Amino acid sequence: MSIPAHRKPPSLIVLSTGFVVFWLVIAAFPFLWTMWGSFKVEGDFFSRADWMNALTGPITMKQHGSPFTLDGYEGAWIQQEFWKSVINTGIVTFFVVTISLTLGTLGGYALARSEFKYTFWILMAALVFRAMPHVTLVSGYLLPFFEMNIWGYLPTTIIVLVAINQPFTLWMLHSFFLSIPKDLDEAAMVDGCTRFQAFRLAIIPVMWPGVVTTGLFSFLLAYNDFTVTSMLLNQDNLTMIPKLNGFLGSTQEDGKVMYAVAAVVSAIVPLFVLILFFQRQIVSGLTAGAVKG
């Protein structure tokens, strides 16, 4: 009996399912292992005698009467004041994403609808600027920031991150706008809309997935940045990633590595939640930008 053309062979289904499950386990294992270990004491999670101690937690049970403990999170968030870095990260990412998307949507729309030849050279200049290493860009800002006494503050870092991120958002949103036919703008203006009203009422709702996708990448740039934030922020205003860098060194000296492990988990969890929440918009946005209508 032949298998219908539209049905996949059972062996192929089992093989593909097994591959996906295997890939997910391999990809998720480092995070799951770290998250599990963040509820143990250092003697269990970094045990050299038996790696199973990280799973069973005999030393944790002996010290706390339970195989799990929140000492790592208490030490990181309260004793090491990691909550301040979380707030700083939230402020930086919010303003970087908001400013980048605002300027990027306006600039990308203008370049996509422009018929002038200089549009290509503007995009090329933006691409070259984006390709430059961040450290070479930030080093040029340091002297004027010191002279103006604005080094070490969050607004200064936000301005620099927006400047670095803007070419990327401009390129991405420009490609999304190109995928939207100009007839949509013209039809809205025929109905009585101004150019800006056509942009706001007719274009933005159509390319909303593209805005979400670009916003997510802008968020990741600001959230995960180390070079810019570590060079431009003082110790009182550090965001999470540079805080973790110094955090690991200080906690190792004190014998409190689990503070750093708990802080790492705290920094990663919001990324998983964000991606799960916006996964549909991200996929539709990426596919929309790949097709020029």
Image (cartoon, rainbow, N blue to C red):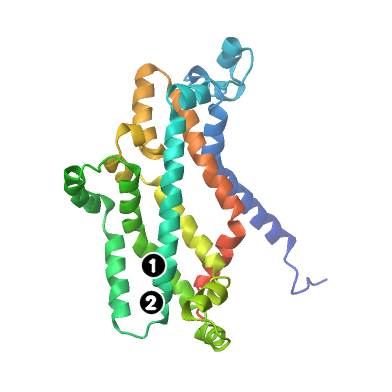
Give whichever of 146, 264 is nearer the camera: 146
Is 180 on the left-hand or right-hand side of 233?
Answer: right
- In the displayed structure, would residue 112 be above or below residue 273? below
Is 26 on the left-hand or right-hand side of 171?
Answer: right
Mark 1 residue element: helix
Q: Position of residue 115 (x, y in %)?
A: 36, 86
Residue at x 38%, y 29% (from the top left corner): 247
Query: What amino acid does circle 1 point to?
Result: Leu
Give whichever of 101, 275 is nearer the camera: 101
Residue ID for mark 1: 170
Is residue 27 at least partly visible in the picture?
A: no
Residue ID for mark 2: 111
Is residue 264 at least partly visible in the picture?
A: yes
Q: How many marks?
A: 2
Query: What amino acid does circle 2 point to?
Result: Leu
Mark 2 residue element: helix
Q: Position of residue 208 (x, y in %)?
A: 55, 67
- Spatial CA distance of label 1 from label 2 is 9 Å
Q: Are marks 1 and 2 in contact (CB under 8 Å)?
A: yes
